[in-house]
Image (tube, rainbow, N blue to C red):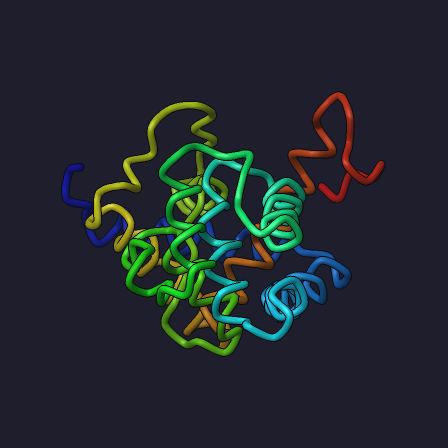
Amino acid sequence: MKTLTPEEREQFVQNILAEWNNATLDQLQRGRSWYLTAHQLADMISEGHVQAGAGVIAALSANKSWPENERLARRAFEVGEPSGHIGDALAKAAKIMAGMDPAEVLPMSAKTGNFYRCILDPEDAEAVCIDRHAHDIAVGETYGNRDRGLSAKSRYAVVAHAYREAAMRLGELPSTVQAVTWVVRVERLAGTGTRPKNGRDHS
């Protein structure tokens, strides 16, 4: 990707702050507790092995909605093996379930590694999960099925930095800013779709 100017980087931050300011009080509350709730899920499905639970959730998260991600992770622990995903994701999840440290299995500088860190420790002050929604919020454009370039460490790092900068200005954790803006974006998209997930349009 081309090197962004300071002005373009600042625009990313402004876009994130604008989405944050769109949050209702209810969305703020749910966004703030998002990773704590995910942490509790990881602890529950793994029967106390929260590291493994968080790792499996992260490994099975690629290109899946959160409800589907949650369903696959629950089923993996209930059945004893992961299923319902592409081979690479299943292989990573299986290694984690077999006892490997998720930090040695997952790409820690990419989305799944950061997602794992946020779930494992909701107070992590550095980790920020940049998925397609987080990316689109920052760039101020909906990419749809176009490649966002997040497999490139430099692209991921630029967007993650924008969230850290926005978080610093808000006095929040980067993961909190990502989660709140994610809730706002996902619920807006659901509200504009033909089948709203919750029957409400928060936009």
Query: Which residue occupies 37% across, 50% down?
Result: 12
**Residue at image location 55% in from the left, 34% down from the top:** 84
Q: Nearer the viewer, residue 104 or 140?
A: 104
Q: How many marks?
A: 0
Quarter in which the N terminus is drawn: top left
Q: Image quadrant of residue 168? A: bottom left
- Residue 185 x, y percent position in the rendering: 60, 43
Pick the front one: 15 or 108: 108
Place residue 179 in its image quadrant. Answer: bottom right
Nearer to me, 109 or 183: 109
Residue 13 position within the rendered picture, expressed as x and y whole percent measured from the top left: 39, 56
Residue 147 visible in the current orientation: yes
Q: Is residue 126 left or right of residue 43?
A: left
Quarter that holds the C terminus? top right
Of 195 and 137, which appears nearest the observer? Answer: 195
Q: Residue at x 22, y 43 (%)?
A: 152
- Taking the image as shown, residue 189 lies to the left or right of residue 153, namely right
**Which residue appears at 19% of the width and 46% of the height?**
4
Q: Is residue 165 visible?
A: no
Residue 141 image point, x, y percent: 44, 33
